[in-house]
Image (spheres, rainbow, N blue to C red):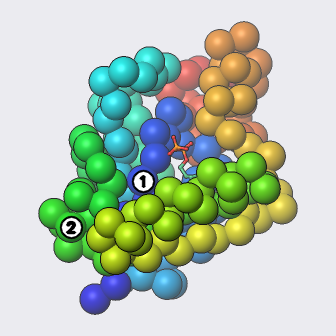
């Protein structure tokens, strides 16, 4: 059974994440969208809100579940018997950053990271820019799934 963890902050989930998750579906039997909790980070949305956004977006998809975790991603993968990590790549900066993490994770655990290249239509979308747009009263409806857009009343 091919089980993948798609780890991230998802603060909030964007159409870029949705694209990677949907395209990962034919590759895996199960995808666990895992919200990493880092006590030192300041998030715009609470973990409950972020879980709800994701849950509402994928409620009809049986292969997808949403969880939270603390600590090392590879330890979490082992805990739930996931043998792959799924990540998205938007640009060379993502690649450089992700490369050493993926290599370290494989060294530590043998777990393979599978990268999907972003779709052209969503490659510019990032949670941090979405947060900026929202904080400043902009309309982010074309960047996020409906569950996020409707909650923030845009
Ligand atoms: P993190 O805090 O770990 O970077 P994010 O929630 O920002 O978490 O991202 C989770 C994953 O989604 C990462 O692999 C990131 O590269 C990917 N991702 C984010 N935005 C996009 C996008 N627009 N297209 C493709 N992948 C994306």
Asked whether mark 1 lies closer than 8 Å to ligand 1, one says yes
Q: Which residue lies furthest to the top in this view?
A: 136
Q: Residue at x 44, y 18 (%)?
A: 42
**Neighbours of disc 2 within 10 Å: few (<14), some (14-19), many (20+):** few
**Regarding mark 2 in the picture, which secondary structure is present there?**
helix
**Quarter of the figure that contains the C terminus:** top right
Residue 34 is tagged as none
Q: In this view, does 144 lie above or below 93?
A: above
Residue receiving disc 2: 78
Tell me the CA gap for discs 2 and 1: 14 Å
In the visual, does 148 lie left or right of 83?
Answer: right
In-front residue for pair 129/144: 129
Residue 133 location, quadrant:
top right
Q: In this view, does 122 lie above or below 145?
A: below
Q: Which residue is drawn at 83% across and 62% down?
A: 120
In the visual, does 79 lie left or right of 1?
Answer: left
Residue receiving disc 1: 7
Residue 31 location, quadrant:
bottom left
**Regarding mark 1 in the picture, which secondary structure is present there?**
strand
Question: Which is more foreground, mark 2 or mark 1?
Answer: 2
In-front residue for pair 97/119: 97
In the visual, does 88 lie left or right of 76?
Answer: right
Residue 145, given in percent of the width and then of the height, sits at: 59, 45
Q: In this view, does 1 lie above or below 103?
A: below
Residue 121, given in percent of the width and then of the height, sits at: 82, 57
Q: In this view, does 147 lie above or below 96?
A: above
Q: Residue furthest right?
A: 120
Q: Which residue is drawn at 26% across and 43% down?
A: 71
> Mark 2 near mark 1, Cβ–Cβ under 8 Å?
no
**Neighbours of disc 1 within 10 Å: few (<14), some (14-19), many (20+):** many
**Quarter of the figure that contains the N terminus:** bottom left
Q: Residue at x 68, y 40 (%)?
A: 126
């Amino acid at each position: 059974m091919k089980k993948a963890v798609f780890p991230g902050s998802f603060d909030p989930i964007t159409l870029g994440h949705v694209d990677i998750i949907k395209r990962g579906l034919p590759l895996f039997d199960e995808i666990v969208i895992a919200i990493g909790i880092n006590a030192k980070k300041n998030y715009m949305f609470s973990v409950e809100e972020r879980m709800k956004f994701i849950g509402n977006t994928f409620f009809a998809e049986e292969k997808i579940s949403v969880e939270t975790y603390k600590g090392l991603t590879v330890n979490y993968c082992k805990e739930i018997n996931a043998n792959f990590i799924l990540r998205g790549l938007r640009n060379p900066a993502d690649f450089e950053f992700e490369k050493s993490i993926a290599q370290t994770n494989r060294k530590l655990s043998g777990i393979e990271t599978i990268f999907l290249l972003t779709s052209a239509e969503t490659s510019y979308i990032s949670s941090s820019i979405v947060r900026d747009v929202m904080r400043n009263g902009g309309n982010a409806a074309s960047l996020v799934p409906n569950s996020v857009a409707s909650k923030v009343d845009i």
